[in-house]
Image (cartoon, coloured by chain):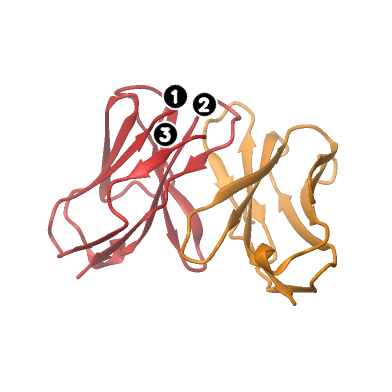
Amino acid sequence: DVKVTQSSRYLVKRTGEKVFLECVQDMDHENMFWYRQDPGLGLRLIYFSYDVKMKEKGDIPEGYSVSREKKERFSLILESASTNQTSMYLCASSTGQNQPQHFGDGTRLSIL
Amino acid sequence: QKEVEQNSGPLSVPEGAIASLNCTYSDRGSQSFFWYRQYSGKSPELIMFIYSNGDKEDGRFTAQLNKASQYVSLLIRDSQPSDSATYLCAVIVRGYQKVTFGTGTKLQVIP
């Protein structure tokens, strides 16, 4: 079974803090993704990566950055957290193009 | 126009009935289609994927794809209360890595 592990289930931070969300997959998947999910807006893609050190902007990259130094790990960084970044953050991975994505359990992030 | 559209529901069906969930998409270059189930407070879980026109069955689930009409549907036979969840339709356009998700249909199976 594919295992995608997100470092925290719940996280509370303050505005202006730099926040790191970590994601690790154990299936040697090429592609990794970061989404946020908000009521009524569905899943929105923030960034994705199809190879080590490669990254592509998704639909809502503003205020975020990512890092992929190793194939199994994909980190999402909130450079200066703001209250409108309070959300559920979901990491996913897939083997390659056109393949289904497998999700981690999510991190519910609250910015106060 | 949204790229992937789903009726938000809720869709209510009695236990044992067939639940029919529908999804339309706008890009004719779409070539991969997925259905995810998401329980409240949980992450999406893949339940079906389909790439070719026609039907694909897996247990109580059947995915149906009609590329000419640009829709994909999910049928759940013998619906159970445990099927109550939000079902997300997802699409990948040919040549692209990213997946576009619909906002989901909430299904309620009434005992």
Q: Residue at x 45, y 29 (%)?
A: A31
Q: Are marks 3 and 2 in contact (CB under 8 Å)?
A: no
Image height check: is A4 above or below A85? above
Q: Which mark is residue A30?
A: 1
Q: Is residue B106 visible?
A: no
Can you identify the residue that label 3 sits on?
A32
Distance from Cα at disc 2 to Cα at disc 1: 5 Å
Chain identifier of the orange chain: B
Q: Amino acid at mark 3?
A: Met
Which chain does tag 3 point to? A
> Could you tell whether A69 is left or right of B68 in the image?
left
> Could you tell whether B75 is left or right of A57 in the image?
right
Does label 2 lie on the same chain as label 3?
Answer: yes
Secondary structure found at label 2: loop
Q: Which mark is residue A95?
A: 2
Secondary structure found at label 1: loop
Does label 1 lie on the same chain as label 3?
Answer: yes
Q: Are marks 2 and 1 in contact (CB under 8 Å)?
A: yes
| Mark found first going from the N terminus, 3 or 2 | 3
Give residue B75's position: percent from left, percent from top.
80, 55
Q: Are marks 3 and 1 in contact (CB under 8 Å)?
A: no
Between A79 and B88, the residue placed more toward the observer is B88
Give residue B32's position: percent from left, percent from top.
67, 35
Image height check: is B86 above or below A79? below
Which chain does tag 2 point to? A
Q: Amino acid at mark 2?
A: Thr
Distance from Cα at disc 3 to Cα at disc 1: 7 Å
Image height check: is A54 above or below B58? above
Which chain does tag 1 point to? A
Chain identifier of the red chain: A
> Could you tell whether A106 is left or right of B77 in the image?
left
Mark 2, residues whose alpha carbon is within 10 Å: few (<14), some, or many (≥20)?
Answer: some
